Amino acid sequence: MKKVINWGIIAPGRIARKFASDLKLVDNANLLAVASREINKAKEFAHEFDAQRSYGSYVELANDPDVDVVYVASPHVFHYEHSLLCLHKGKHVLCEKPMGMNAQQVKELAMVADQRNLFLMEAFWTNFIPSFVKCREIVANGVIGDIKVIQADFGFKANYDVNARTFNKELGGGSLLDIGLYPVFLALELAGEPDQIKASAIIGSTGVDETCSMVFNYQKKGIIANLSSSFLVSTPTEALIYGTLGTIKMHTQWHAPTSISIIKDGKEDTLTFNEPGFGYEYEIQEVVSCLLSNLKESSGFPLSKSILLHQTLDRVRAEIDLSYKFD
């Protein structure tokens, strides 16, 4: 009989609720404990999702000897701190993105995980969703020929609140780190590290980017990626991958699409995907499989990809002159 992997969740917010729901869909995965800075929140969450233990502090959860791996779902600015806490307490970690506020924090987490022989992965769920896996496969098989243009957007009209996670600089606010990293991820995944980055942003009154536009130039490969993110307007949130032989359209919401289309020779072939949960079960399954195989990194989303992602986000931020206190 396979071992059951016991999970702990730090910060039971909106994403953690979806995650906990999808955890039930994965074999050999058990939600053992949940921690919130407010014990009543932890208790309510634990009751709703059948977690056996609830804690009023993150340290208590990290000290629980029966917790194998911790899902860190706190606001951006705390990801590094809370992941580091868990690693130092000997816990494997799946950290919500962005894993750090800059590449240096991500490199430090990777170094600590390596030193302590622990598993660490950034929770980039899109990477493991079947529709995205299929899209990557179509590209790799040369179905649309050589990629020439990548176009991806992610925008929604956020409720303007200077204290909200989205706009508060102290909480790591801004569209780039919250949703802009999805288009950046797509370009890196399909075309690799860009030779040149040009970016422009609307910086709001709270000092963070409310809209960000990026152009990645792959001079050597002959590829251009046009990417954008916004909290000011709702955009189609679609991705188009234009190749010399055809086009792939990832329909809205493209970062977790239930359908993708291949457009070739004037014909459109649409593939649909039935999603049993919210889409988090695939990254959960990846972590469980890695831990059962005693792996310290996912081959599907290794730490090198997270480091490159954050180095690229740092390059974009340099272009739009956006820095945080952690830089």
Image: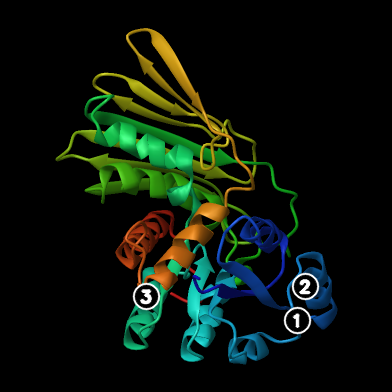
N-terminal-most mark, 3 or 2: 2
In the figure, is residue 108 to the left or right of 237?
Answer: left
The answer to whether residue 26 of the structure is visible from this angle is yes
Which residue extends farthest left? 220
N-terminal-most mark, 3 or 1: 1
Task: Residue type at mark 1: give it.
Answer: Ser
Q: Residue at x 68, y 73 (%)?
A: 11
Q: Residue at x 81, y 82 (%)?
A: 39
Residues 99 and 103: in front is 99
Distance Cα–Cα, label 1 vs label 2: 6 Å
Mark 1 element type: strand
Looking at the image, is 116 positioned above or below residue 4?
A: below
Task: Residue type at mark 3: give it.
Answer: Asn
Residues 180 and 38: in front is 38
Residues 291 and 238: in front is 291
Q: Which mark is residue 294?
A: 3
Residue at label 2?
46
Q: Residue at x 57, y 71 (%)?
A: 71
Percent x, y of residue 263: 39, 17
Q: Mark 1 touching mark 2, by CB under 8 A?
A: yes
Looking at the image, is 10 positioned above or below residue 176?
A: below
| Mark 1 nearby-residue class (10 Å; few <14, some 14–19, many ≥20) | many
Percent x, y of residue 89: 51, 91
The colour style of the image is: rainbow
Q: Would you identify the image quadrant in which residue 53 lies?
A: bottom right
